[in-house]
Image (cartoon, coloured by chain):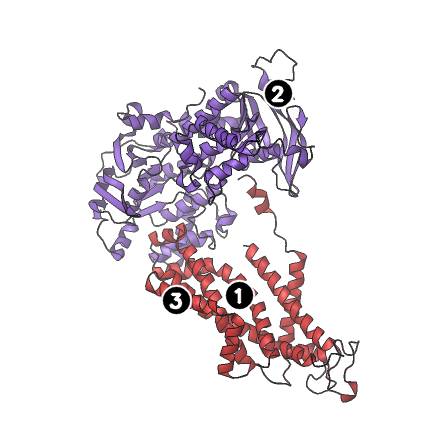
Chain colours: A red, B purple
Amino acid sequence: MTVVAPARLAVRRVPPVVVLSFVVVALVLSWSLVPGLFTAQNPDVGVPADKFLGPSAAHWFGTDHLGRDLFARVVHGTASSVTSGLIAVGIGVVVGGLVGLVAGFIDGWADVVLSRLVDALLAIPAFLLAIIIVTSLGFETVNAAIATGVSTVGVFARVTRAEVLKARSSVFVEASYLQGGSRWHILLRHVLPNASRSLLALAVVEFGLSILIIAGLAFLGYGDPPPASDWGLLVSVGKNYPLAPWLVYAPALVMIATVLSVNRISRWLRKTD
Amino acid sequence: MASQDRLTLDRVAPPAEPEAGTLLRVDGLSVAYGGNEVVHDVGFGLRRGESLALIGESGSGKSTIARAVLRLLPPGAGRAIGRVEFDGQDVLSLSERRFRPLRGRRIGFVPQDPGHALNAVRKIGVQAKEAAALLDEPDAARREELVLETFAQVGLDDPRRVYDSYPHQLSGGMLQRVLIGLAVLPKPALLVADEPTSALDVTVQKRILDLLSRLREELDIGLLLITHDLAIAAERADSLVVLKDGVVREAGPTATVFAAPASDYTRRLHADVPALNPERYRHLRSGVRGGEPKIEVSGVTKTFTVEGKVLTAVDDVSFSVPAGTTHALVGESGSGKTTAVRLLLGLEQPDSGRIAVAGEQVTGRSHASLRSIRRHLQLVYQNPFTSLDPTWRVERLVREPLDRYRIGNRTERTERVRAALDSVGLGEELLSRKPSALSGGQRQRVAIARSLVLRPDVIVLDEPTSALDVTVQAGIVDVLLTLQAELKLTYVFVSHDLALVRQVADTVSVMHRGRIVESGLVSAIFDDPQRSYTRELLESIPAGVS
């Protein structure tokens, strides 16, 4: 027992890799909010004479088959990739969280019915489920985001339920009940805040995962058609030109850096309190 | 070196070479975690067959010293400087490869909480086999025999059954016996016991300590006992080392340190042990007043059905508590005292019998009408580490009952929160802290403030100090009794610690297997117990120097 004290008192420092991850995520978010600040070039109109130029000072990521600046296309495509990731996570957190909360807090048939539904949802691979949903909704990036969101509902519901069950049986919840707390008060003020830490870490991981799934859907052509420049679509178009490999590498590397950073942040969030 | 000499003064050195008797010698030991030194220049010596107790409150560095001796400091973070000599060999400078044959074989370890020290999903026997692998015995069947023999030696009645059980099928006391057995199995020369009984009931505690003393004599083991309880240390150890903030405050033969403490700190420790000072709070207690009963429990029975078997947790229990006094419910774990408390608070409904608090029935009422009773009836939980929401700040925690019962306006509530914190001795600087930034004692004070803020008449205290050190316990008890004298509170005090009960309570009910076996005035029960069970409980109070 005596060992714990000094470690607790020490000022918790943020590891450098986490700082770097935050920088990457901040950069990606600013790309999506104000792409004009980062590149002056037009992502949709190219100079045909400059087609298939390799990465250089003038074109950081090189140019594509129509002579469009690839960096501009990546930057301008960020908004749609990031927004769809957020939409997907938003759906997962809200719907999955609610299902998990109800299942965890109300015993009996509600728990049984909801938990079995979640089991069924989890039994279908997320990517397959997303494809099925997006096919029925129509090929559009927003629909791909919604489809991805629905496919994450199961995971969120499962984790929320477990956290709610854990918080609900803790002593401080009974203490609050003895001190006059109503069910709603306990649910919203004690159970939810205690469950939300795991939920936040999960949401961040799922955000990275959703970006990948949405890119995958775009790659397969289930998203907005060209000239939209979703990251997955850029990779998909770029693969047609094996002599210009940067068309695949550049957007793929941006994607990898984003997802890795997001995962690292999530891991850090889970460890800190 | 000076302290070394004092430690061994009264012992006649064996006639052989002068250094021969010393089994463990610690010299100038300092331990640091990161850059933070927590143990400073500690030194003591221990002979074979002797026992030495390291005493101190949590944070005093006593467990850290044990870890340093066993070389179990967290790799990278913990660094030990100085000399730890075991049987003439400096263990700190040994390579891990050369130290490993010592740990387990020559130096045994008994952990604090037996419930966490065994793997829950493997049978005791399988885990015993791992320990038996340390023996120089090639034959597996013979090794198993030795394990069973050792189990019998540590007082396990049916070694074969224990061998074939999972940890959850055994009681805490039996598990601790298993662990002691596994530790002494390779016939070590030194046994390090880190608070071996703090997770156990008093009667079990006495038996485990008896066992350790017996093994020490029979097997000629040196025992390094780590404890926060001066009474236990004084009763069981030949010499004492008193630690505070990682520094040795006092060291010497038990009789000297105990009878004539030289440092203020030891004197304070001495004063904080309930068993040694039964009359400490006499001035705060006005004795039993003939007031009308505040709590009346009559003929209450509660049964639970577990896996088809009917368990009677509380069996025909009756007691009453006059206003402004403290009634203690005493018993070992499983005696039904916690169930009795839950019934009293209306958290469970009894099968039969009735409970009334301040003239109002608790039994057979709806949730809504119970709410109005609870305003006058509060509970302080056993463990302040679980009873406070970790995401809330102190101010909000203490204000919660006021908010829930909509008492006063904003400024009045803030005022009452401050007054409640003030009355338990906490300053305003703690208002914006979260529980994780508070010590155990501070947390329990917050929990008490939280139950006081509604100005209840009755507070149920469910082992309020069992998770805390003796020194912290003394502070909490002081607060509770001062508040009782000021506010005329009625307490129901649940505890397994009879010495503490003697200090705080006016009347007592001794519970055993769901029934009250004896009840009455504390002075009467303690001076003249009628039942054998009560006598057994009383005998297990550590009495200081034996």
**Which mark's residue is nearer the viewer, 2 or 3?**
3
Q: Which residue matches tag 2?
A: B22
Three-letter code for the amino acid on which mark 1 is drawn: Ala
Give the quarter of the figure containing the N terminus of chain B.
Answer: top right
Q: What is the secondary structure assignment of the residue under circle 3? A: helix
Q: Position of residue A90 (x, y in %)?
A: 50, 71
Residue at 48%, 19% in the rendered image: B259
Q: Name the side, left or right, on which A223 lies relative to B540.
A: right
Q: What is the secondary structure assignment of the residue under circle 1? A: helix
Have a look at marks 1 and 3 and say if they share a chain: yes
Relative to B37, residue A82 above or below = below
Residue closer to the observer: B76 or A252: A252
- Gap in angstroms between the C-alphas marked 2 and 1: 60 Å
Q: Chain of mark 3?
A: A
Q: Which residue matches tag 1?
A: A203
Tag count in the figure?
3
Q: Chain of mark 1?
A: A
Residue closer to the observer: B363 or B129: B129
Q: Could you tell me if the residues under marks 2 and 1 are in contact, i.e. CB atoms within 8 Å? A: no
- Which of marks 3 and 1 precedes in the sequence? 3
